[in-house]
Image: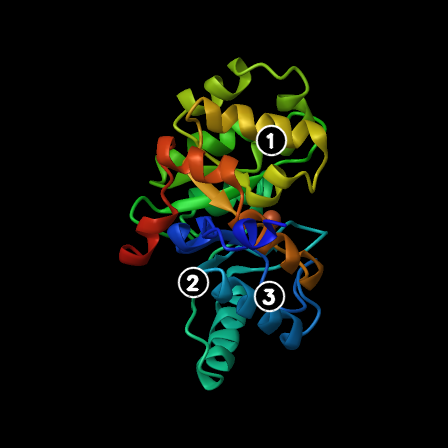
């Protein structure tokens, strides 16, 4: 009988506050992201609808799986941006990548050939999900020596970190000068209960500097709406030093 009362409540609108996404797969046909330009456009239109103004495009650079190079990212962003502009979609793209940590990545870091973004030359890195990465410490050392700031993508999804549910593992990473990015959709359970729980623990401890959608496909568009109205997220964004919103002034 009072359904009009609940339906009239103001939506929380979390994502409008974030402004910029810094981990997403929007470029068509170069990794496990959108398969066509139309799919890229529908994802971006959905992002605009929930308040995003732009994104750092972080398609995978993962040798022998997604053999992309910096030039592929730069060309892909130029071409997608021109389609957005032609269609009057007000959304700014910037080229970067989600780098798998391996020997080739270390060589790119040493040669200062990583595609970085933001005022601290941030670079998003990933590892495999189950086991510790043998190149990790060397990669972090070389990145920092070359002047990059590492952001570890979705730490809540790595079993080797999260299965103990202990915050010590994450503290060790933060102590190395690495910033942490959780996936938005972890908070609504897209990757299972453990990732959801660990993402919440990380937020509760104010360990998170970045929130990325890590959106890949149009099937995930409906999750944007859900996350936009998530109370856990709005509470956490007050306490955590989330950096997304500062990207507009530094890229
Ligand atoms: Fe990703």
Query: Which residue does the numbered mark 2 point to in the structure image?
Result: 54
- On screen, residue 93 versus residue 193, left or right, reads left
**Position in image of residue 1 (x %, y %):** 63, 50
Judged from the image, the secondary structure of the residue bearing numbered disc 2 is: strand
Report x, y in % for residue 215: 61, 54
Distance Cα–Cα, label 2 vs label 3? 12 Å
Q: Is residue 196 visible?
A: yes
Cα gap from disc 2 to disc 1, whole angstroms: 24 Å
Q: Residue at x 66, y 71 (%)?
A: 39
10 Å crowding of disc 1: few (<14), some (14-19), many (20+): many
Query: Is 249 situated left or right of 219 in this image?
Result: left
Check contact, mark 1 vs mark 3: CB within 8 A. Answer: no
Lower sequence index among marks 2 and 3? 3
Mark closer to the observer (1, 3): 3
Q: Which residue is mark 3?
A: 43
Can you give x and y, in whole percent of width and height, for residue 65 in the image?
Answer: 72, 52
Q: Residue at the spot x=49%, y=69% of the render?
A: 77
Residue lying farthest to the front in this orientation: 1
Local SS, label 1: helix
Say how many tags the image has.
3
Q: Can you identify the residue that label 1 sits on? A: 156
Sequence-wise, the earlier of marks 1 and 3 is 3
Displayed quadrant of residue 209: top left
Q: Specify the color scheme.
A: rainbow
Q: Residues within 10 Å of mark 2 (few under 14, many from 20)?
A: many
Quadrant (top left, top right, bottom left, bottom right) of the C terminus: bottom left
């Amino acid at each position: 009988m009072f359904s009009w009362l609940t339906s009239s409540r103001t939506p929380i609108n979390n994502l409008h506050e974030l402004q910029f996404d810094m981990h997403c797969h929007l470029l068509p046909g170069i990794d496990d992201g959108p398969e066509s330009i139309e799919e890229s456009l529908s994802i971006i239109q959905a992002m605009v609808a929930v308040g995003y103004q732009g994104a750092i495009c972080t398609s995978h650079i993962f040798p022998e799986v997604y053999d992309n190079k910096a030039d592929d990212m730069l060309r892909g962003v130029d071409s997608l941006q021109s389609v957005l502009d032609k269609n009057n979609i007000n959304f700014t793209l910037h080229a970067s990548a989600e780098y798998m940590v391996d020997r080739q990545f270390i060589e790119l870091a040493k040669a200062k050939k990583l595609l970085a973004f933001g005022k601290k030359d941030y670079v998003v890195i990933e590892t495999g999900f189950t086991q510790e990465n043998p190149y990790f410490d060397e990669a972090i050392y070389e990145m920092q020596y070359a002047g990059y700031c590492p952001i570890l993508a979705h730490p809540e999804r790595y079993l080797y970190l999260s299965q103990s549910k202990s915050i010590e593992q994450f503290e060790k990473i933060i102590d190395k000068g690495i910033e942490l990015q959780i996936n938005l959709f972890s908070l609504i359970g897209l990757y299972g209960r453990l990732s959801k729980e660990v993402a919440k623990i990380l937020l509760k401890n104010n360990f998170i500097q970045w929130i990325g959608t890590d959106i890949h496909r149009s099937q995930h568009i409906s999750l944007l709406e859900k996350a936009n109205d998530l109370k856990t997220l709005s509470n956490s964004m007050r306490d955590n030093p989330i950096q997304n919103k500062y990207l507009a002034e530094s890229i």
